[in-house]
Image (cartoon, helix red, strand yellow):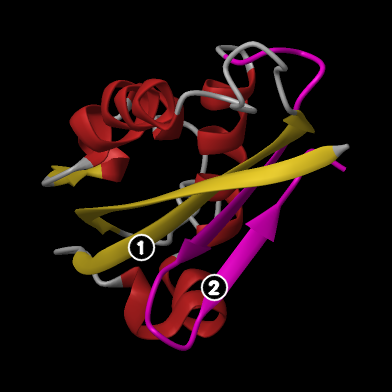
Amino acid sequence: MKVTVSRKAHFNAAHRLHRKDWSFEKNDAVFGKCNNANFHGHNYELTVSVTGEIDPETGYVMDIKELADLILEEVEKPFDHKNLNLDVPEFADLNPTAENIVVVIWNKIRSKINPDFDLEIVLYETPRNFVTYSGK
């Protein structure tokens, strides 16, 4: 029997949607106000969901404290109150769109959990705008 356990978290970060290989005009046309040269910020909300078989010894799919610690180390500490473009190495050459951010987070967490588990990340950039990634 498979069960999904989820943990919510949040981080605040600034970013700029911008491609170095595009002109100012093209960046402005595609990204609009999100291409502000002085950056802009979001209060990101995150839900990390792990699906797997219940361990008959513990009754857990995954210890939620272990999941919370993993999110803290892999997402909150490296992203919170940071400029994603300037302070987070994964975005040195990757445009920090919500879509790219969720994939980066998924990859960071995926490598640290049981390979038999399914992983899904939901990232809210605003209360109305969110992306979901499950590795597919």
Res 118 visible: no
Q: Residue at x 25, y 68 (%)?
A: 42
The part of the chain drawn in magenta is: 113-136
* Residue 106 occupies quadrant: top right
User: Percent position (x, y) of residue 31?
Assistant: 48, 76
Q: Nearer the viewer, residue 114 or 135?
A: 114
Decide: marks 2, 1 in contact (CB < 8 A)? yes
For badge 1, the amino acid type reads Glu
Which residue matches tag 1? 45
Q: Residue at x 88, y 37 (%)?
A: 1
Is residue 87 a member of the stretch shown in magenta? no
Q: Nearer the viewer, residue 15 or 104?
A: 104
Q: Residue at x 61, y 56 (%)?
A: 99
In the image, residue 106 sits, relative to residue 129, either above or below, namely above
In the image, residue 132 sits, relative to residue 42, either above or below, namely above
Left or right, residue 41 beside residue 109:
left
User: Percent position (x, y) of residue 110?
Assistant: 63, 22
Left or right, residue 2 beside residue 77:
right
Mark closest to the chain's N terminus, 2 or 1: 1
In the image, residue 31 sits, relative to residue 83, either above or below, namely below
Q: Give the secondary structure at mark 2.
A: strand
**How many discs mark residues in the rendered view?**
2
For badge 2, the amino acid type reads Phe
Which residue matches tag 2? 130
